[in-house]
Image (spheres, helix red, strand yellow):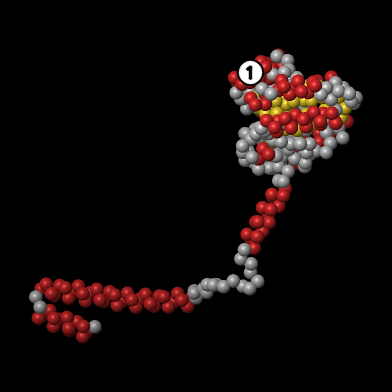
Amino acid sequence: MKRLFSFYLTICKKTNRTFRFIFLFGITLSLILVVGSKHFWKERSVNTEIHPQKQVLTTLPKDTEPFQDEKKEEEEDDDDEEESADEDLASDAKSPWTLLESALPSRYYEPSVKKNRPFIVIFLTGLGLNKTWTEHILATVDKNVTLVFSPYSPNLTEQIQRSATLGYQAFVNFPMEPNAYPNPDPGPYTVLVGAKEEDNVQKTKLILEKIPRGTGLIGDHGSKFTASKVDLEPVLKEIKNHGSLFVDPNTTIRSQIKSTCKALDISCLQVDLTLPITANLSEKDDFIKKVIQNAKENGMVIVNVPAIPAFTNALPEWIETFGKHDVKLVTVAGLQTQEFSLDASRNN
């Protein structure tokens, strides 16, 4: 340091003031750097001794399977696909209706006296949301067709009362969770598997409060919900307290509605066949033939038909065809007058 300072004084004597200032600044900066670097390396050496640097593992152990989690997820996906093999076609976003052909091996109803003449019940589904179209249906459709209103219809109570005044029997769709929920999503009233019991009961009450006591309900979707007896019981109890008949949409072979209705002593029916909304002319003809065949073989058949113009306009022709085959179209109430028992205790 002494030598450095002497060198500085010598330079100052030989240079003017400008160069003196530059050299003074340079010397000061050099001192700061020297002292600072010594302190930095001292601190680094201390920290290294206290916290030794961790080694990074660059290779996997031989017994490690890096894609084990991915394999498990793929296997779980495969299991989910198998479980939903019998999912209703309603999971297709194109259509809210399904084609369901006798998914359950036995019916919920049992004829006390089986007449020689078979019967057909047609549920015309999806009314109420379009007021103009609903009024057209009320003015043109045969009174033996059972009308089904959406629970989201405006003025639902008045619509049901009006249809009854005109001589129709009215039901209301009861939205239930499908396997692929929320695609499709039957709406905010949908009862869900695993939801709190009070939530599903509250949704059920919201629908029942809108309709006259005794008005029947028919399930909408429900391939997942109808397979859960735990979730079904409180909902069906509310429906029973309302004095309503419940119709299983028949969307899964795992449905627990039959056994639950029997345990709770509730009158229940089951849809046998549903006409898909995408059916073309030949498919519609084949469907009617199948309906007539099922009615003759079993004494009665319950079918679900979307209320779209292509189907409703064909109803008069279908009813005429039923008559030619000596098959009678009746409402659910008409079944009771035809001596078909809806007593839940007789349901096998």
Residue in view at x 73 percent, y 24 percent: 318
Q: Is residue 188 left or right of residue 25?
A: right
Task: Write down the residue under mark 1.
Answer: 136
Q: Secondary structure at mark 1?
A: helix
Please identify the residue farthest to the front as the structure is shown: 282
Please identify the residue farthest to the top as the structure is shown: 165
**Mark 1: few, some, or many residues within 10 Å (few <14, many ≥20)?**
few
The N terminus, quarter of image: bottom left
In the image, residue 121 above or below residue 98: above
Residue 312, picture quadrant: top right
Residue in view at x 54 percent, y 72 percent: 58
Q: Is residue 302 left or right of residue 152?
A: right
Q: Is residue 57 left or right of residue 327?
A: left
Please identify the residue farthest to the right as the structure is shown: 113
Visible in this render: residue 305?
Answer: yes
Visible in this render: residue 266?
Answer: no
Please identify the residue farthest to the bottom as the structure is shown: 3
In the image, residue 241 above or below residue 59: above
* Depth order, front residue of 70/202: 70
- Residue 118 in picture, x, y percent from top left: 84, 25
* Depth order, front residue of 43/125: 125
Residue in view at x 34 percent, y 78 percent: 38
Q: Amino acid at mark 1?
A: His
- Residue 188 in picture, x, y percent from top left: 62, 34
Residue 196, picture quadrant: top right
- Residue 49 in picture, x, y percent from top left: 47, 78
Residue 200, picture quadrant: top right
- Residue 311 in picture, x, y percent from top left: 67, 26
In the image, residue 67 above or below residue 261: below
Residue in view at x 87 percent, y 35 percent: 348
